Amino acid sequence: MTKTANVTIVLNKPKYPGNVGSAARCAMNMGIDKLVVVGNRDLAMEEMKTMATHVAAGIVDGIRYFDSLNEALAGFHYIVGTTARRGGARGPLVSPREMADTLVDISQKNEVALLFGPEDTGLSNDELRFCHLVVAIPSSRHFKSINLSHSVMILCYEIFIAKGNIQETFTPRLATSAELEGMYDQMKALFLKIGFLNPQNPDYWMMHVRRFLSRTRLLSKEVKVIRGICRQLDWYERNKKT
Amino acid sequence: MTKTANVTIVLNKPKYPGNVGSAARCAMNMGIDKLVVVGNRDLAMEEMKTMATHVAAGIVDGIRYFDSLNEALAGFHYIVGTTARRGGARGPLVSPREMADTLVDISQKNEVALLFGPEDTGLSNDELRFCHLVVAIPSSRHFKSINLSHSVMILCYEIFIAKGNIQETFTPRLATSAELEGMYDQMKALFLKIGFLNPQNPDYWMMHVRRFLSRTRLLSKEVKVIRGICRQLDWYERNKKT
């Protein structure tokens, strides 16, 4: 079973307090009790608690607020994004059920964030780059726009009922998002320097690099190895003119 | 795949128009576009449509209203109830996934009702008696009370993604609820007459009879056969004194 104590709902720039309260209730229905809100500190407490009901009011009281997604995700080891849209930039998408099966193992020793975008636009490509896994919730082609709290419910429900097989032998503790972002910053600086990236649009190739490294589920020490290689390349580049 | 054109959401005595509108949106997200409301004709249209969004407003406009559950269910062949509680009187419960697998086959030729109770109390034992199948949505033991529209979403979602195997050879058209209720009324009258039922509480044994007959998925002509037997027994009873 998924260790729901290690799962946090992260709502990026939610607009309506009612949706945040509803999301809190859904999370608690499915055994998840941590909620993070990014980029909106003005949500009316009263409205959130009405939708959460008194039983889940404690989750609303315990919401941690952040101004940037970067900060909010820094401590997480595994980040699951959600999208309604499909398209090249989003890379491979999985179903809620596949996600839930994946989390059974990963959640045993890693802090997991379930990341949801604003009600109207969802997560941007830029925001999806933080994610190790991107989930598309199946829906009718006639009306794909699922309410925020109902998207939260579907993912939490699948996580709650997933049984999966915990591999006793190997449940690694992954690198945190902060460690990965530090690594990506260093890689990007190096790639720009060596002319691998177009300075006009450096993120285009970086996105591809991020994507396959995300899927790799890097360990903390592997991040250190990669950063060591970058440092060495950087040193070599600075000294090769001799 | 489930034939969602044959699936209708039936909300029994919903209190809040927002929940009805949300349920309409969830249904439409998952390809279901028929909604029935029982026992409340005073739901504010404006509030329903706000939660449904303009895309699902047509479902709200098309809501069919009934005063009694009996009337509302009369035309359906297969009725799925929902409950959060467990207990002897509720009989065997299935998971949303098991329900969805069952409906893949049945929905091909039968009108299916997904029946939900009021926000505060859910369906009573009396109301659950109409159901061929009763679903319990899994939830945390710390907070089992799932919002009405989120319960609707979980069931619709499972139905939408269920693939199942359609048995090409045999998907019978079942007796309608009206046919079944007529049969049960006749049986009850007969059983009372012959002293099989306690007149103080005739429904106690009837519940057990209903339960196994519901699971049997009776065909229209089988209902006629059973009613024929009842009629014959009745005739015999009236004439045996000679």
Image (cartoon, coloured by chain):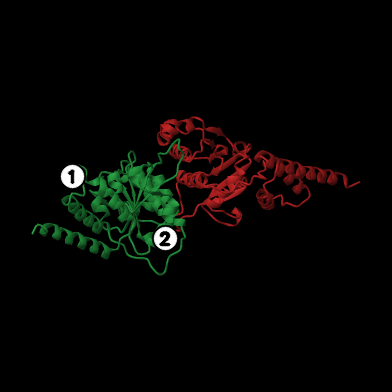
Chain colours: A green, B red
Residue B189 coordinates in the image, percent (x, y): 74, 44
Which of the pair B93/B106 is nearer the observer? B106
For the residues beneath circles 2 and 1, the answer to whether they share a chain is: yes
| Residue farthest right in this picture | B242
Residue A55 coordinates in the image, percent (x, y): 39, 53
Q: Is residue B125 visible?
A: no
Name the subunit of mark 2.
Answer: A
Query: Does residue A121 sit above or below A160 in this rendering?
Result: above
**Kind of residue at badge 1:** Pro
Residue B26 coordinates in the image, percent (x, y): 46, 40
Whole-number angstrom distance, CA of label 2 to CA of label 1: 41 Å
Q: Is residue A148 visible?
A: yes
**Kind of residue at badge 2:** Val
The residue drawn where x is 19% and y is 42% is A200
The residue singled out by tag 1 in the image is A199
The residue drawn where x is 48% and y is 29% is B61
Residue A164 coordinates in the image, percent (x, y): 46, 61
Query: Does residue A16 sit above or below A64 in this rendering?
Result: above
Which of the pair A35/B198 is nearer the observer? A35
| Callout 1: SS | loop
Number of labels in the image equals: 2
- Identify the mark at residue A104; answer none if there is no mark: 2
Task: Decide if residue A212 is on the left or right side of residue B139.
Answer: left
